[in-house]
Amino acid sequence: MSSPQAATNEPRRYQLFIGGEWVDAESGKTFTTPNPATGAPLAEVAEADKADVERAVAAARQAFEGKWSKLSARDRGRLLYKLAQLIEAHAKELAALETADNGKPIRESSYIDLPQVVENFEYFAGFATKIEGETIPVPGQFFNYTLREPLGVCGQIIPWNFPLLMAAWKLAPALAAGNTVVLKPAEQTPVTALELGKLIQEAGFPEGVVNIVPGYGETAGAALAAHPGIDKIAFTGSTEVGKLIARAAADNLTKVSLELGGKAPNIVFADADLEQAVNGALMGIFYNQGQVCCAGSRIFLEERIKDEFLERFKAKAEKIKVGDPADKTTQMGPQVSEEQLNRIKGYVDIARQEGASVLTGGASPELDEQFRGGYFFRPTIFCDVNNRMRVAQEEIFGPVSSVITFTDEVDLIKQANETIYGLSAGIWTRDITRAHRFAREVKAGVVWINTYNMFNAASPFGGYKQSGYGREMGRHAIELYTQIKSVWVDLSGKPIGWFGN
Ligand code: NAI
Ligand code: MG
């Protein structure tokens, strides 16, 4: 396994992918994406701006009106399947690049991100031939049926926490349904999306079907969201930017789907298998350095197990191996950027000011010389938190859990739902009635019972409340990328009587 040092020796270079060609930005500008483990430059990337987004949207439109719409569903499926196979063949290098660009441990990029990327392309490859209309039993001499058609050109703006996987969640259903795409990766992590562009080319997708425009949110992203030439905008990222996207889209009534922030309750009842619940709490908040929209960041503990749970939770959190993400035994790498690291540090101060206490963590770890420039933070647990504190209400997006205790189930559910978010929730209990009652009552798009962070390409994912709208993955994702046309046919062959005289 190459160390991040080796990966940063010579910055890689990438251009924009527009209309099937690799091109510089019209402005000639580039930006650098660092390796978050060291702070050293990993790649120099062409910086797309409004003018490049214009070109990309035009290329996507041309592809949509041209070759792509003439291709059969089977052939679209075959291309997606070919792409899945190419990704699988290059999984090792893609995982290493994901780790170098994002900082996530290589064991996560190798065994979670990449397999799920392949799974998503495979799942939607099979879906291309199963997108169907319906016949509707209307009365009289009429025959009514529906056509399920693609939307057209889709803008897709993705975040940095699962760079390649977010590209897969967005691209696979859009392409299966027959749309063309302009994809804007996050400025922190553009590398694997651009590598994917090479594989899209190699798989044989017609030019312009997928266009990739790395750049900043305020420039490239905003230009894409406000572009009147797109039919849909799909976004994953902060709730704050989600609102900007929805506003920009409103001007053109562009269709929107949003997958935004969260502040998930992860609830442990006294009757739970404690070992399982502790492991689930660790997985819920420390996985991917806590940079997960569905992170179980509010841990609700039934009061009488508080001491025992916290003792085990703290001990295990302190054993987590933080360090070189390219090392196979590392469990937590650096945060994605200095900006994110500072944001997390800021919340430690806020927690203290609010009267919460730091049970463990709260600072960066001591690491070898080589990683001093990296953005590392220790697994952190805040105790004595109440649900009204900022650390219980705001998305921190780091390895920071806020522990709240409860005694009464009714009050617990009220507190669990007292948040602007509603993406996910977890519950640990052996009482199946309670578990399913909770699943009904919690306002969240995903509920995990005695497990956490489970995903499958066939299972829908998305938020309630300010966590967004629309469901990705599964057949619901096809609904996000298609529209229905209702077709009426008069079977009687007679003239219409009404004004016909
Ligand atoms: P962000 O929401 O600004 O970035 C996500 C994507 O949106 C990136 O591709 C970015 O370039 C783009 N973007 C930013 N401003 C835009 C604009 N005005 N118009 C169009 N596109 C725009 O997230 P950021 O600033 O990187 O992180 C801030 C916080 O957002 C995090 O601390 C976390 O709380 C949350 N977040 C949530 C994610 C999720 O998976 N739901 C992912 C990333 C961040
Ligand atoms: Mg931002």
Image (cartoon, grey):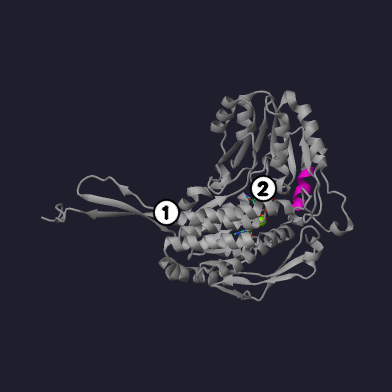
Q: In this view, does 146 lie above or below 279?
A: below
Crowding at dot 1, Cα within 10 Å, few <14 / some 14-19 / many 20+, comes out as some
Q: Marks 2 and 1, how far apart in space?
A: 31 Å
Note whether ligand 1 is within 8 Å of mark 2: yes
258 up-or-down from 65: above or below: above
- Is 130 magenta? The answer is no
What x and y, as percent, mark residue 91? 66, 59
Q: Is residue 104 visible to us here?
A: no
Quarter containing the N terminus: bottom right
| Callout 2 amino acid | Val
Query: Identity of the amino acid at label 1?
Result: Ile
Q: Respond yes or no on whether mark 1 lies under 8 Å from ligand 1.
A: no
Task: Please tell me whether mark 1 sits on a helix, a strand or a loop.
Answer: loop
Can you identify the residue that label 1 sits on?
131
Give the quadrant of residue 269: top right
**Which mark, by number, is residue 378?**
none
Where disc 2 sits, the SS reads loop
Residue 341 in view, yes or no: yes
Tell me if residue 342 is in the magenta stretch: yes
Q: Residue 255: x, y in percent?
A: 47, 55
- The relative height of residue 303 versus residue 200 in the rendered view (above or below) is above
Ranked by sequence position, the earlier of labels 2 and 1 is 1
Residue that lies at the very extreme toward the left in this rendered image: 501
* Residue 384 picture location, percent across and down: 77, 32
Camera-nearest residue between 243 and 148: 148
Residue at the (77%, 42%) spot, across then down: 350
Find disc 2 in the rendering and name its residue.
Answer: 292
Give the extent of the magenta segment: 340-349
Quarter placement of the C terminus: bottom left
